[in-house]
Image: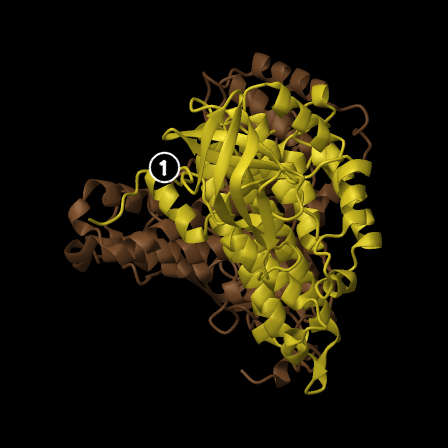
Chain colours: A yellow, B brown
Amino acid sequence: MSEPGIPSLLYGEVEEDLRATLRELLRDRCAWHEVLARIDTEEAYDEGLWKAVAAELGLAGLLIPEEFGGAGAGPREVAVALEELGRAVAPVPFLASAVLATSALLACPAGEARDAALRALADGTRTATLAVTASTWPGASFPLSVTGARDADDLVLTGAVTGVLAADRAELLVVPVVVAGEPQLALVAGDAANLSRRAVTSLDATRPVGELTLDQVRGRVLAGPEHAEAALGHALRQGAALSASEQLGVAEQALAEAVAYLKVRHQFGRPIGSFQALRHRAADLWSDIAAARAAARYAAACLAEDSADAPVATALAKAYCGDVAVRAAEECVQMHGGIGFTWEHPAHLYLKRAMASALLLGTSDRHRATLGTLVDLPPAI
Amino acid sequence: MRERGDVSDTDSGPTGEPTDRPTREPVRDLADGSGAEAIDAAEIRRRVAELVAAHDPTTMSSVEFLGHRFDAGLAWVHFPVGCGGLGASRALQQVIESALIAAGAKAAGGYRNPIGLGMGAPTIAAHGSAQLRAELLRPLWTGEEIWCQLFSEPGAGSDLAGLATRAVREGDGDWIVNGQKVWTSLAHKARWAMLLARTDPDLPKHQGLTYFFLDMTSPGVEVRPLRQATGQAEFNEVFLTDVRIPDTHRVGEVGQGWAVSNTTLMNERVAIGGAATAREADAIGAVARMWRDRPELRTPGLHDRLLRAWVECEVARLGNERIRQQLAAGTPGPEGSAAKIAYARLNQDVTRLWLELAGEEGLGYDEWAMRRSELGQAALGARVPGYYYLRAKGNSIEGGTSEVLRNVIADRVLDLPREPRTDTKVPWKEMPR
C-alpha cells in the first residue's frame, strides 16, 4: 500500500502472533513484583524465563537463518519481541545475546567457530554477549582496550572491557581485539582460562552490566581486519535501531500504568485524571508514543530491507524513542505522586530501564550528531 | 487548511451527556452492502476502464470529466448508488484513484472545494433528504459549487455548542436567521454553507440547535474579509440579517443539529489522504537549506535546535505515513488528533528557528497590504520567513485548538474521567456569556 521508498510501518500478522504469544508468556511468568523481588537476590536474570523465551519460543534464533537452526525471521520480528520484553522489563539477556552478539556473528564470515556459535545460540543452549562497553554508539572508533597476539590459528587476548551487558552471564563472548594494530573479532568462551568476569551494581538491575578482564585468554578468530569493523558496526547499529522498539514498549507500559492510576486515584473529590493539567500531559505522552512507534517501525523495516536509509532511520529512532521512553517513565513517577517514588511500586523499574536504555548504544544527543553528518547539517564552526 | 471550530466541545453529545462517539468515519456505515459483494477491485478497475473509454479525461475539462465520474458511481465509492457511489467498501477508493491516475486523469481537485468534499458531502449523504442529495452532491463533487461552514462565532469558538445565531420559524414556513459567524474559509466563493443555528434557547445548549444548508446567494448574507496577523485575509466574517431558509433545506430534525454537526466534524481529518510528503518538504527543508548554504549564520545553540527539530519533523512525517497506511489497510486509528497537535507545534518551532537563523533578514517583511489569499500557508519560497512564523501561530488554533485536541485524546483514546461540567444541564439562555 505504501509508496516505494517508505516500507510498511504497520505490524504484520506473523508479528502480531509473535507479540500475542510472548505477551501471554510474560504475563504468566514475568509479573512486575517478581521482577522487583529479583533485584534483592543474587540471580540477576530469570533463567527459567530466559529458557522459555530463548529456546521454547525460539526467540533467541529470530535473526538466525534456518540453516543454523534459527527462525530465519528478521529485525521486524525482533523489534516486536523487544517491545514486549521492554513492556515487562523482563530480566533476560535478549538484547545482549539475540541482538548484539548474534548480529555481530552474522556479519562475520562463515567459519567453523562462528557457525557453531550461531547453532548454539539458535537452540537456546548458549547465551552470548558483545564485549563492548554498552554505551558505545554505531560509528564510534574501534575499541582498543583489548589487544591480541596470534598463536597458531587462534588469538591470545589481554585487556579489559567495562560496562558489558550480561558480562558474567554469557557463555560466549564476541570480543573486539586489536592484533598488530589491526581490528579483529574473537570468540571467547565464558569459562576460558584467565578470564575474570564481574557484575557491577547497575542503574538497571534487571539488565546489569559488568567487567571483563582478560589476561592471556585464548580465543578463536571470527573476523579479520577486512571484516571486523564492519561486523562490529553492524551489530551496534542493529542494537541501537532495535532498542528503540524496547523503548517504545517501556514507554507504552509507563503510560498505561499512569493512565490506570489517573482513573482510580481520587483527590479533591474527583479522580485526578479529570484534572486538565494531568489529562493534557497524558495526551501529549500518548501522541509522542504514537510518533515513536512510527520511528521504531521505520528503523526495523529499514534494517529488514537493508535499506540505504538504515543509518538515518537508526539514528532517528534511537534519538527520538529514547527521549520519549525516559519522559514517559518520569511522568509515570510524577503522576503517581508519593507512591510512584517508592520501591514497592513498579514505576522505578520503568524509569531505570528507560534511562539505561537511553544511555545504551549512543545517547539521543550522540545520535542527533550522527544525523547531522548523515543529512548534511554540519555543526557551527 | 481546516475550518476553525471543527473539533469543538467534543466531549458532549446532543443531550449534554458524555458520549463515546466513534472515531471512525461514519460514512462507512452508509454502504448498505447491497452492491458490496459484487464489487471488488477487479470490478472497480473494469468500471474505471469503461468510464475512461467513454469519456477521455485527457481531452475534456476536469469539471466535465468529474461529472461523468460521479454519474458512474466512482466519486465516493462507499456512497449509495445515485449519490456518486456504488455502496461498496471504502477501501476500494484507492483503487479508483490509482486506476484513474494511470489513465491520465488529474487527481480530483480537493483544493478547490476542500470543505465541500471533506465535510459537506458526508453530511449530505448521511443526513440530507433525497431531494438535497440529488440537488447538491453532483455540483459539489465537480467543484461547480463551492461549500463553506458556518459554525464558529465570535462567542463560540472551542465551545461550539454555545453558539448564538438564531433561527426562528415563520409558522410552518421558512426559517429566518440572524447572527454572526467567523473564521469562515471560502465564504466569499461559496454557493452553499453548512449552518448550525439555535432554534430553542430555552433548552440546554446542545439540544436547542438545528442544522441547515444555506444558499449563500440569499438576501441578507454579507461576507467580509477577516484580516489576520500576517496582513492578508484567508478567512471571512459572515453576517446574517433576516436571511430566509426554506424548511426543505433543514438537515435532520429540529433540535438535532448537534448530532448532525458531529458527522461534519468527524469527517474532517478523515478527508486527509494522498501521498506521503517527501523528507524536508516542509519548512524544516527551508531551514536546512539556509543552514547548508549560509555557514556564517550557524551557532552551536541553533545547531542543537535544528537537529532536534529535524528529528521531530522526520518522525512526524513517518507518523503521518503510518496513519496513511492504516487508512489504506482499512484500519484507521485515532492518531489523527495527535498528528495535528504535532504539526502545529513543529511548524511553530521550525518557523521560529528559521527567523532566528535568518537574523537581520528576519527583521524585514514582504508586504502588509491586505490581500485575499488562498487557504492555508503560502507555498514555501513565496513569502519571507516572517510570514511563515506568523502564519504558523494559527496552526494550534484552527481546526480545533491543541488544547481541545488534547481533551479529545484524553477522552476518546485514554478514556480518562471527564472534567465536571456546569454548562450542559441549564437552559442556554441562562448561561453566562
Percent position of residue A367, x then y = 42, 46
Q: Is residue A69 above or below residue A38?
A: above
Give the position of the N terminus of chain A as an image quadrant: top right
Amino acid at dot 1:
Leu
Residue drawn at x 71%, y 22% as measured from the top left: A68
Q: How many marks?
A: 1
In this orientation, does residue B108 appear?
no
Secondary element under disc 1, as helix, strand or loop, is helix
Which of the pair B297/B11 is nearer the observer?
B297
Q: Is residue B85 above or below residue B3?
A: above
Which of the pair B171/A173 is nearer the observer?
A173
Residue drawn at x 63%, y 75% as measured from the top left: A341
Decide: few, some or many residues near mark 1? Use Cα within 10 Å; few <14, some 14-19, many ≥20. Answer: some
Q: Which residue is mark 1?
A: A374
Residue drawn at x 67%, y 27% as measured from the top left: A118
Q: Chain of mark 1?
A: A
Judged from this view, the residue extending furthest toward the right is A28
Which of the pair A296/A159 is nearer the observer?
A159
Judged from this view, the residue extending furthest toward the top is B53
Q: Is residue B288 left or right of residue A331?
A: left
Percent position of residue A231, x then y = 50, 29
Q: Is residue A363 left or right of residue B251?
A: left
Percent position of residue B156, x then y = 53, 71
Which of the pair B293/A32 is nearer the observer?
A32
Percent position of residue A160, x then y = 49, 46
In this orientation, does residue B296 appear?
yes
Q: Is residue B268 left or right of residue A54?
A: left
Residue drawn at x 70%, y 65% as measured from the top left: A257
